[in-house]
């Protein structure tokens, strides 16, 4: 492979990294053609791009990742997805044992700029986007504050008003 082809591949992978939030690294090198075809078909049906790339090129792309040697050994396939957990489900649904080793070998995932290495696939299947988690926390806090305000309102209006005045005065100072 010449230098221009390598640069083109690196450019394509980097553009995919910007486009997709959910990237999985797996090893399916031991898959026979029938298993590989089924795996690729599942990926295609779920709008997942899958790309086989040399580890030396991956190391160039991910030069800032400290644990890249854990990710990029043997043969690496990258799965690019716009859905947070569909890739993990596909990996789990296509698990087979070849010589008592479970394949595909899950190496890691880059999910919303967070790196997961050696995580349990069930954890990644149940993972929720950061925005959803933050909205859930805000909703819970909002409910707690409303309950607190209602409690103070019904129990002691004057005490509640004094508390609000103190808080307002401290914020203005």
Image: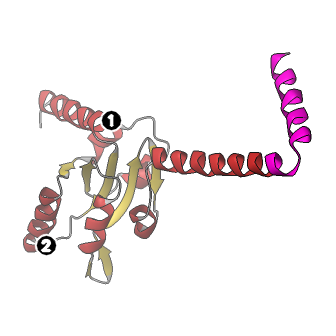
- Write the residue at 30% across / 37% down: 17
Q: In the image shown, does 168 or 6 lie closer to the viewer?
A: 168
Quadrant containing the C terminus is top right
Residue 71 drawn in magenta:
no
Whether the residues at callouts 1 and 2 have beta carbons within 8 Å, the answer is no
- Write the residue at 18% across / 33% down: 6
Give the residues in magenta.
152-172
Residue 61: image tag: 1
Residue 156 point in image, percent of width and height: 89, 47
- Write the residue at 8% across / 73% down: 34
Residue 154 drawn in magenta:
yes
Q: Residue furthest bottom?
A: 100
- Write the residue at 32% across / 54% down: 25
Residue 52 point in image, percent of width and height: 19, 51
- The residue identified by callout 2 is 35
Q: Secondary structure at mark 1?
A: helix
Determine whether 68 is above or below 27 in the image: above
């Amino acid at each position: 492979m010449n230098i221009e082809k390598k640069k083109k591949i690196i450019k394509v992978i980097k553009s995919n990294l910007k486009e997709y939030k959910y990237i999985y690294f797996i090893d399916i090198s031991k898959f026979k053609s029938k298993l590989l075809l089924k795996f690729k078909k599942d990926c295609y049906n779920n709008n997942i791009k899958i790309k086989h790339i040399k580890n030396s090129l991956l190391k160039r792309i991910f030069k800032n990742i400290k644990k890249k040697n854990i990710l990029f050994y043997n043969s690496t396939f990258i799965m690019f997805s716009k859905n947070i957990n569909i890739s993990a489900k596909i990996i789990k649904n296509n698990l087979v044992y070849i010589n008592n080793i479970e394949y595909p070998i899950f190496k890691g995932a880059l999910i919303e700029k967070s790196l997961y290495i050696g995580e349990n696939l069930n954890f990644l299947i149940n993972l929720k986007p950061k925005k959803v988690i933050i909205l859930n926390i805000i909703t819970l806090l909002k409910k707690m504050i409303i309950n607190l305000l209602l409690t103070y309102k019904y129990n002691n209006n004057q005490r509640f008003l004094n508390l609000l005045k103190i808080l307002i005065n401290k914020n203005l100072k």
